[in-house]
Image (cartoon, rainbow, N blue to C red):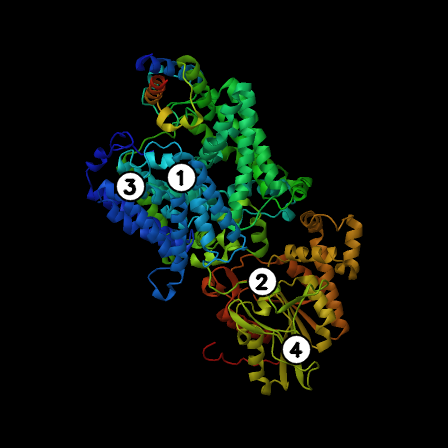
Amino acid sequence: MNAIQIRTMTRDFILKEFLPGERPENLTDSTELITGGILDSLATLKLVAYLEKSCGIEIAPYELVQENLNSVALIADFVQSKQAST
Amino acid sequence: MIKPLSLPWPAGSTESAEAEPRSILAWFAIAGQLALFIALVHLLRLETNALVRVLIVALAGWCVHYFLPLRYRLPFFALLSFAAIAAVFANLGPNWHYWRFEGLIDAAWIVVIGLVLIEITGLPIAFGWRVLALVGAGCGLAAARMDWIATPWTRAVWPVLASMFMFRLIVYTYEIRREQKRATLSERLAYFFMLPNVCFPLFPVVDFRTFRSSYYNADRHYIYQTGIQWMFRGAIHLIFYRLVYQRFVIDAADVSNQVDLVQFLIWPFLLYLKVSGTFHIITGLLRLFGFNLSETHNLYFLSSSFTDFWRRINIYWKDFIMKIVYYPFYFRFRRWGENVALVSATLLAFLATWLLHNYQWFWLRGTWVFTWNDFLFWMILAVLVTVNALHEMRHGRTRRLPGEALSWNAALHTAGRTIGVFVVISMLWSFWSASSVPQWFSVFDTVGVEGPGKMTPVLVLLTVAAVIGIPALVLARGVADHQYSFGRSVALVSVCGSIAVCISLPGVRDRLGETVSTAMADIRMPNLNTRDKANLERGYYENLVNVGAFNPELWIVYGQRRSEEWKDLEKTPLSEYTGALPRTYLRPLSQADYRGTLVHINRWGMRDQDYEKLPSPGTLRIAVVGPSIIFGAGVADDETFEGLLEQRMNEQAADSGYRHYDVLNFGVGAYTALDMLAIIEDRVLAFKPNYIFYFEHGALIPRMLDNLIIAMQNGSAYRYDFVRDIVRESGIDDRADPEVLKRKLTPYGERLLRAIYSRIVETAKRGGVGAFWLYLPRVDESSSPEVERRLAAEAGFNVLDLSDVYDGYDWRTLVVAPWDDHPNAAGHRLIADRLYEVLRQHRDLIPLNLAAAPRKEGQ
């Protein structure tokens, strides 16, 4: 799965689950998700479960940090690095 | 929100920051705003003197720091933090008379112990052994904290050291196990010895990873200016806190209708403004040195759900618990299903929060606090958050992107939920702060407001709903998402800050009318009467924020208190406990240091010169009874007003027809009406006075009830029929919780006082003694005791009024100390002068034959 695919599926998931009714163009790759209040702890856990299932990776608790999850772009980079390491 | 001057760059990219242009204008703007902030904190006394010293160090340091290349800024910040510790502990300031070089020993110990702890985390041994070594060091320090081991440092060290290490060591150890790039020495020193901690012990948790990764991760002028904004916002929180503290606090015993009930339920939560204000100042200060930390306590009164409240209030704590407890347990339990994992992890997170709050209490105060209120508070909050989280997990929650608005329907729902959450959290907080569970439940038996004001509770509730609901609606509609430019932000803060500083200047505020002047006095004066202080100090955070309440040594370091012990009279050798009425007597022929002066007690148990028991022929004898003002708390033996009055009367005795005047001081600190009745009956009359002067100041009835309850519970109050009658009629069980008893006795307050006054007057009359009731206010007293005055007159007292005794003087110049509102020597001279004049003017009531003698030089 390449970076563009991961970004697309992540964005779609966030729009569907957490921002229903929001215009897709408002959620950019650099929109702040954690510091912007979109990804709270529950949403993070939902997203992690989705990423683990869809991308075949396993995420550890200590990896749930802003550097990995604060934007669609960061999430895609993180998922790719996890896929590469497995 | 300030619009960034340039786009953020990825963390760790130093080249961009190195190449960042410097702007002298921006430097002036930020330094000027910081100077304004220091002036505001100083003029309004918003915090301790220690904060002012730290801010001055920060301002001087920042002016240099701004021009340093990035690679030197972090080491410079660490050095500045050490300088702040030294400045606070050595009390360095413009007046070198107050410097305390012995404080540098404590400062050095903080640094040495800290360095040892940091060194343990980096020992070249297995991770498990390092953790074990840290636990061993922690146990050793805990033993010293409990005074099991003698230490070469004072107790002032503990809260500061604890705030730096008690949680950060846990976070740091968690991170180093996984860190890919070892933290530099500067990073470690800056993290642990963080500049603001020396004056804010209640800021222990910062995530190490965030601390590192947020360092200059955005435009630096944006980071600095946001920091300035937060600091001023913190000042606003502290100002509102002071106003609530002075004007809104109500004791459970005083709750008599639904309006009082609403007030009682809300004020404890509002007092959290103190914590949120200090957190804003701390994080703002850290931003000035490049740490782009997240905003904490963001509009927490406007939380739209319990999970939202948990996310908004102290996000540093929330992040800590999520990282250390919640996520690890959730991942461990999720094999049993999402809901099981969610419920278990949430409950465990709150259980850990409760335990760790006790752990924090131990390190800051040296004791443990396991109370039912505390445990139930955290567990009820846990259940509310868990139920809320389950609901959100299933049905989601309404979110919006910054700048976007919710629909009117969704916004109205959000506003409604916000009001509900505010009400529930307020109730929960008041429960947490109550002195006992029965006391909290007892306030709900409040009767309704009758007559024309019966709609008042509804109006009050509607006002509360509007104050919370309208801003919540505005937020949900995205109206508050304006972006300000750097220039506009500087202009706004500078103009508002300048206005606030101007209003705070003594020469200006006194010209702005009584309302402004009184409000400013409320903001500047943190003191409350003893009863209200006791009431306030029940709250968890009040107990930890108010350093003076638990660590006198650190309070001295903070420049707030002189080195003398400032004990209550009952805790000195001058006082002996009777277990009856009055509850204490002064110990005959004792002497001791009390509130900065040596106090002597004569052979009869009076703070006075020696007298024969019976007056000599031709002597007119006056016995004065009253509380601590009469005793002369905080002034020397020869400075009490009764002594000065006696001296002045005797100076003109030759022309008066009396050979001598005796004024006997039966005043004892903490006496109230029942104690005074007892001492008059048991002791005063035996000295054959011609007159008894019974002194009172405001807020008598609540204090009287406190003492009455003690006397009821030890049985001594039942020597009086009127006490027995009230207990019988009301069905009060004197074994009940004292706070519940006080609530039940409050409606009988006037009746009790009337009975006591009547008995004093009857007793005096039987002995042929004239009884006078005199109102003598405390120095900063604003209320007038109309009820007590009326009851005294109805009982047959001759009533005299000294309410204007301090008129024309700045009351701040007449108090014993900033934290003690008893009159000082100058105040006692004013009282003696005014009392002399009042007695001379009322010669029809009291024929003392006093001459209109000119005041002595120097009085």
Mark 4 packing: few (<14 Cα in 10 Å), some, or many (20+)?
some
**Disc on the earlier residue, 2 or 1:** 1
Give the chain letter at badge 3.
B
**Disc on the earlier residue, 3 or 1:** 1
**Left or right for B5, reference B570:** left
Asked if labels 2 and 4 touch by Cβ distance under 8 angstroms, the answer is: no
* Labels 4, 2: one chain: yes
Label ID, residue B603: 4
Disc number lying in front (3 or 1): 1
Q: Amino acid at mark 2?
A: Asp
- Distance from label 2 to label 3 (Cα)? 49 Å
Residue picked out by circle 3: B491
**Disc on the earlier residue, 4 or 2:** 2
- Distance from label 4 to label 2 (Cα)? 22 Å
Q: Percent position (x, y) of residue B412?
A: 49, 24
* Labels 2, 1: one chain: yes
- Distance from label 3 to label 1 (Cα)? 55 Å
Disc number lying in front (4 or 1): 1
* Labels 3, 1: one chain: yes
* Labels 4, 1: one chain: yes
Q: Nearer the viewer, residue B631 or A83?
A: A83
Label ID, residue B125: 1
Q: Amino acid at mark 4?
A: Arg
- Distance from label 3 to label 4 (Cα)? 68 Å
**Disc on the earlier residue, 3 or 4:** 3
Disc number lying in front (2 or 3): 2
